[in-house]
Structures are given as C-alpha cells and as structure tokens.
Amino acid sequence: MTAVRICRILRTAVPVAATSLVAAAIPLAAQTDDASGHWEGSIEAPGQPLVVIVDLAETDGAWSGTIDIPAQGAVDLPLRGVAVEGETVRFTINGVPGEPTFEGTLAGGEITGEFSQGPARLPFKLGREAVEVEAPSRPQEPKPPFPYDEEEVVYTNGDVKIAGTLTLPPGDGKFPAALLISGSGALNRDLELAGHKPFLVLADHLTRLGIAVLRVDDRGIGGSTGSTWQSTSRDKANDVLTGVRFLSGHDRIDPERVGLIGISEGGLVAPLALNRVEPGTIAYAVLLAGPGVPGGDLLRQQLRRIAAANGAPAQMIEELATLQDRALEIIGSGMPPREAEAALREVVIDQLAASPETAQLSGDALEAAVSAAVENNLSPWFRFFIRYDPRPALGGLAVPTLALFGGKDTQVDADQNQSAMEAAFAASANQDVTIRRFADMNHLFQTARTGSPAEYAQIEETMAPEVLGLIGSWIAERFVD
C-alpha cells in the first residue's frame, strides 16, 4: 500500500541497465582536500558495483548531507551522523534498516573506505569527477514532444492547495476525463516510486486515446500543501471531489464524462468519494488493486505475503504477525495518547529486534526508527485506514466500474480483497461491473516473479501493456465518441 522505501541497500540493487545517462566529467580541483561538496562513486558489491552520489555541506562546524542511489530510484536520502575529523569521513543513511554507514579516508581528492550494513562489509570509493550512472531502463516512460496538450493546474480545497498536470487530447471538443488517485503515502503526481512513474505512463496512454487526464501531487508533496499523514482517506476523497469540480468546469471537458481511477488506497478513496456526491457527478470508476476489506485485515495478510515472498522462515513470520496484532490492537484502541505511545514503543522495539533487516539497529539509529514508526502508526491517516471498512461504499457504487487485481500482489492480496469486493458488488444493484485478475502481476501491475516490493525497481516494465490496454478500451467503449 505504501510508497516503497529503500530497505536493504545491497539486496535491492538492480542489474546494470542496457542504456545509461552519462554526465560530463567535470573535475572540481578546488575542492580536492575538502570533504564538502559533490562526490560520486560506488560501493563495490561483488560483480555489481552500486553507484552512489553524495553531497556534503558544513555550516558553522555542523555537517549535513544527502545521498542518491540511482539504480534504486532513491534521491536525496538524508544522511545523519556526518562527521569529518582530520582525514576521516563518516556518515550513515538515515532511517534505513541495518545502519548503512560509510567510513573512509579523505586523501588525494578521493574518499575511500568501508561501507557496512548489518553484517555486510564492502569497499567504497568516492571522487570528484562524475561517473557513468547506469539509469534503469524504463522503455514505457513517454518522452516529449507529446501529441497532446499539457496544462499545469492549481486548485484549492479549503486552505489546502492541490497542484497537478492536466493532459488534453488535441482539438476543440468536450472530452471525457479521468482523475488519477494515488495509493498510500505521500506521492507525487506521477506516482513516482522505485524508479517508475506509473501515472505518467497511464496518463500518456489514455490521453492518446482521447481521454483527458488529471494527475496531482499528494498533500505535502511537490506543489501541493498540507500533510498526508495528518489527514485521512476521507480528506483525500474531499480533495478528489474538488478535482472533479475543477475538471467539470474546464471548457474542454465534458462534465458528464468525468471518472476516477484509483490505485491501492486510491481504490478505496474513489468509492468513498462517489458515495458522497449526487448521481451523475462522476461517470465511472476504475479500481486498481483496491482494498475490499478493512485496513487492519489487509495489513495482516500483507505482512505474511511480503515476508513469504522475501523468503522469511515460517517461525519468523508467525512471530512478526503476533507482534503486528499487538500493535494494531493498541493503534485501534481508545487508549489515551501517551499510554498508546508508550505501549506501541515496546511493540515496535520487539518488531525491529525480530526482523533480520533491523535487528542490528542500536543507539540513535534504533531510537530514530522507533520514533518514526510510532509517529506514523499513531497518525490520523493510519488510524483511519486500519478501521475503515470499504465494503459499504463499494456496494453503494452505481456507476460503471472496472476492478483489476494482480495475482502476485503481496500488498493487496487478490484472494482476500477480490472476493470481498465481488461479494459487495453481488449484493448491489450495479449492473455494469467488470472484475479481472492478472495472474502474473504485482501490486503495480508489472509482470513479476515473486510479487515482492523489492522487485519493483528491478522490473523494466512500469505497467503491463495488457493492463493499460484494458483500462483504455474499457473507458473508450463507454465514454469516447
């Protein structure tokens, strides 16, 4: 459900891509013996060097920095514990399990030393010259010039500003339109994660078919204001309805042919929004890997599926599942805030200790991981999500609806959620419902091997062509002149 985070720097590295982007090599001789500034190099993983780009800065004696890992789609990850003492340079990637740490010696315009993460120990080397960055191949990502129009748009929902991009087919007609709704987490308008931009690919495909598409930044991301974690799926539904009103008032869009396409949490938000408007306001719904059960139930199955896909032994999965049940009970209770925080901290510490990826955490790194987990899990967004049952809203849908699932989806399990959704539709009066499962596809509708989120960045395909084709043809048959 959530945006993918880099969990194991080495394990999630991807093979060298067939194409690359080569930056011009510009020596920065003036900075040769100074740790501050721009560094590029690699961690020497056996047979597969992993390119890293590091920027270090010193202000009034305090050091800070960021790191990019292009092969994993990671940009501007913050560094902590940045220390420069004589020739020794040390820093750690913040918030990543296993305390990925670089410790090296600055000499001759290079930083060379050892990278460690958990038990792994590997050499690394950073220099001042730009290195060849092997960009992951993303053959579906569209490149300009585009055969359609683009508009940068901004509208407001109360005091929250929503920014996005509207793509419009060429011509003067009144076009059907789709508003894209992201999954959980704070994501930009392209749904950018793991080096992929699924909403950019989907918007391009649909607009070429004659369908206008609006994709927007989530609250607190890009050009949008507010906070994703301090809001809920209901607030997101209100943002969606504001977007629908914006589209309906656009002079090149037919207000009677505006629909919603939501993925993951977005597949929960779309029915929630539809159930809050007058009939005829929204014309259709496309639900991609949408939840069919309450969030707490979904997360229980998600833990088991992801852990199994990653090869965790059965005993460990059961231990983690028991701890998750304890955490969900605390989060969903009516405990006073301080009492809930204290109780949840204990469970989170046990969870981190039980997982091989985080068992090595200690000191400041452990405290940072615990604090972040407690804060996120007690946020308004998460508390709403685990309690909300999407089935009544699904049963209330009275518009043409397309629901798709991936058979290898480990985040929104198809067996669990498709069956619940089918039951909700069967009990409704909706006569235009299409539900399909793609056996070999994951949560992002990529053709996958295991379905683990660790694979997302490694797969070249952003969204399977047959899924794009079905979404496009289903909408076009009903709403494109």
Image: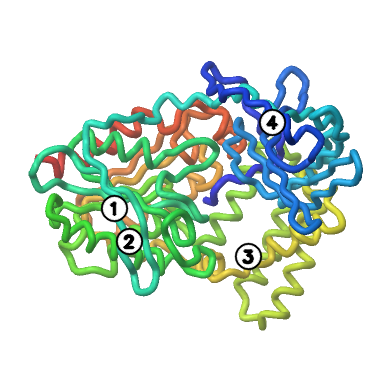
Q: Position of residue 127 (x, y in %)?
A: 74, 28
Provide the residue designation for mark 1.
260
* One can see residue 28 in this view: yes
Q: How far apart are marks 3 and 4 (CA)?
A: 44 Å
Which image quadrant for residue 427?
A: bottom left
Instruction: Identify the mark nearer the N-term, 3 or 2.
Output: 2
Q: Which residue lies furthest to the front in this view?
A: 30
Q: Where is residue 133 in the image (x, y as percent from the top left)?
A: 60, 25
Give the residue type that dot 4 points to.
Leu
**Coordinates of residue 417 in the picture (x, y in percent):** 45, 50
Quarter of the image where the C terminus is located = top left
Q: How crowded is mark 2: few (under 14 residues within 10 Å), some or many (20 or more)?
A: many
Category of crowding for the residue at label 3, using alpha-carbon neighbours closer than 10 angstroms: few (below 14), some (14–19), many (at least 20): many
Mark positioned earlier in the residue sequence (2 or 4): 4
Query: Given the image, on which type of amino acid does mark 2 rest?
Result: Val
**According to the image, label 3 marks what residue?**
377
Q: Are marks 2 and 4 in contact (CB under 8 Å)?
A: no
321 and 165: which is toward the camera: 165
User: Which numbered tag is attached to residue 240?
Assistant: 2
Left/right of residue 438 with respect to residue 316 in the rendered view = left
